[in-house]
Image: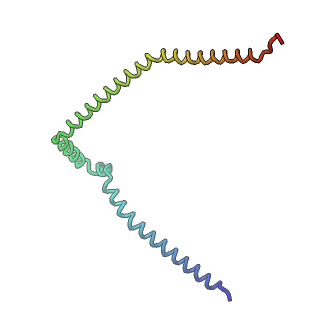
Amino acid sequence: MSLQPEIAAARDDVQRARDQISDTIAELEERVTAPVQAVKQRLDVGRAVREHPWAALAVAVGAGVLVASTGADERAAEIAAEQARQAAARAREAGAAGLRLASEAPSRSRQALGGVVDALGAKLVISIVDALRETPSRAD
């Protein structure tokens, strides 16, 4: 009993299913891509301005008048000025901290150098004491 014909039929069924799935995916991509492209074209501001420059200018002027009439530009300027004042204050504080650190640097350096010298001196004394302990006495 050979299973070859059944295997071949199953392979054909799988291939047909794959082809059908591929066709369905291609159709779905086509259905989705066309509307997306249409929306992208409608939202292309640069192209709209090139095609209708006077209308774009009128919209820009209208938007400017609208923003100016709401006072949003003045509020934005006030906020920007306050942020600039705060940034300047932080910069002054940072500068003062930097000066303080710079003025303390020599004394800190002296302290660090003193610590190193003390450590070296202590090591020297310990090595001398160790050497003296190891030296045989002449009285022996």
Q: What residue lies at 63% left-to-right and 85% top-to-bottom? A: 5
Q: In the image as oriented, which residue stretches furthest toward the left?
A: 69
Residue 116's x, y, as percent?
58, 18
Q: In the image as oriented, which residue stretches furthest toward the front?
A: 140
Q: What residue lies at 45% left-to-right and 17% top-to-bottom? A: 104
Q: In the image as oriented, which residue stretches furthest toward the right?
A: 140
The number of numbered discs placed on residues in the rendered structure image is 0
In this rendering, the answer to whether 14 lies above or below 114 is: below
Q: For this rendering, which residue is in front, 67 or 137?
A: 137
* Quadrant of the image containing the N terminus: bottom right
* Quadrant of the image containing the C terminus: top right
Residue 119's x, y, as percent?
60, 18
In this rendering, the answer to whether 98 lies above or below 29 is: above
Q: What residue lies at 45% left-to-right and 69% top-to-bottom? A: 26
Residue 89's x, y, as percent?
31, 26
In this rendering, the answer to whether 31 lies above or below 58 is: below
Q: For this rendering, which residue is in front, 136 or 123?
A: 136
Residue 72's x, y, as percent?
20, 40
Image quadrant in which you'd find residue 35: bottom left
Q: Is residue 76 left or right of residue 127?
A: left
Q: What residue lies at 59% left-to-right and 16% top-to-bottom? A: 118
